Image (spheres, rainbow, N blue to C red):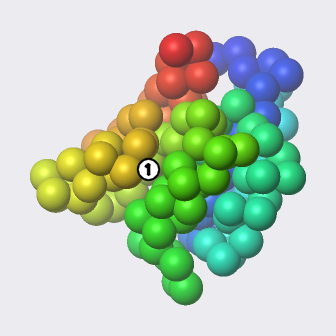
Amino acid sequence: MTNLQGKKVVWVEDDKYLVSLISERMAETGAKLVVVSDSLKAHDTVKTEMPDIVVLDLLMKYLDGFEVLKQLKADPSTKAIPVFVLSNLGQEQEIERAKELGAAKFVVKASIGLDGIIPEIGKVIAK
């Protein structure tokens, strides 16, 4: 199990089932997890929490993840926080767009199990 003791993760995800699974797994790592299910609140939450990493879904109601990513990278107070995009979108153009907007990592949900996500988050934080 990846040790994220003392690290803070803001996870922007509106899938309640996935959030419940993630919350359990993250608790085992020692990280502090802040879940944001409303994309309109994502930027303000990140500014308030100042996490070590943001995990961001792209497909959400209101604002999509690309818009949230743009907001985070345009704000001097949040632009240095690494953003880990975790999405069901996996087309080359979506991956390229996320990277151009400043994502540190892009992972397609279907290609990685929950057990694989946390070590990847740890790698991004360690960079």
- Residue situated furthest front in the rendering: 76
- Residue situated furthest left in the rendering: 92
Helix, strand or loop under label 1: strand
| Left or right: where 117 falls relative to 28 | left
* Quarter containing the N terminus: top right
The x and y percentages for residue 41 are 73, 71
Residue drawn at the location 49% of the way across and 35% of the way down: 117
**Number of numbered markers:** 1
The x and y percentages for residue 107 are 35, 42
Please name whichever residue, 107 or 2, is drawn nearer the observer in this view of the structure. Answer: 107
- Residue situated furthest bottom in the rendering: 62
| Left or right: where 108 falls relative to 126 | left
Q: Which residue is mark 1?
A: 86
The x and y percentages for residue 76 are 65, 45
Q: From the viewer's perspective, is residue 1 above or below residue 75?
A: above
| Left or right: where 86 falls relative to 98 | right
* Residue 48 seen in the figure: yes
* Residue 108 seen in the figure: no
The x and y percentages for residue 48 are 85, 52
Residue drawn at the location 63% of the way across and 53% of the way down: 75
Residue drawn at the location 33% of the way across and 61% of the way down: 88
Please name whichever residue, 71 or 33, is drawn nearer the observer in this view of the structure. Answer: 71
Q: Quadrant of residue 31?
A: top right
Q: Residues within 10 Å of mark 1 (few under 14, many from 20)?
A: many
Q: From the viewer's perspective, is residue 16 above or below residue 21?
A: below
Q: The disc labelled 1 sits on which kind of residue?
A: Leu
Residue drawn at the location 56% of the way across and 61% of the way down: 71
Q: Quadrant of residue 32?
A: top right
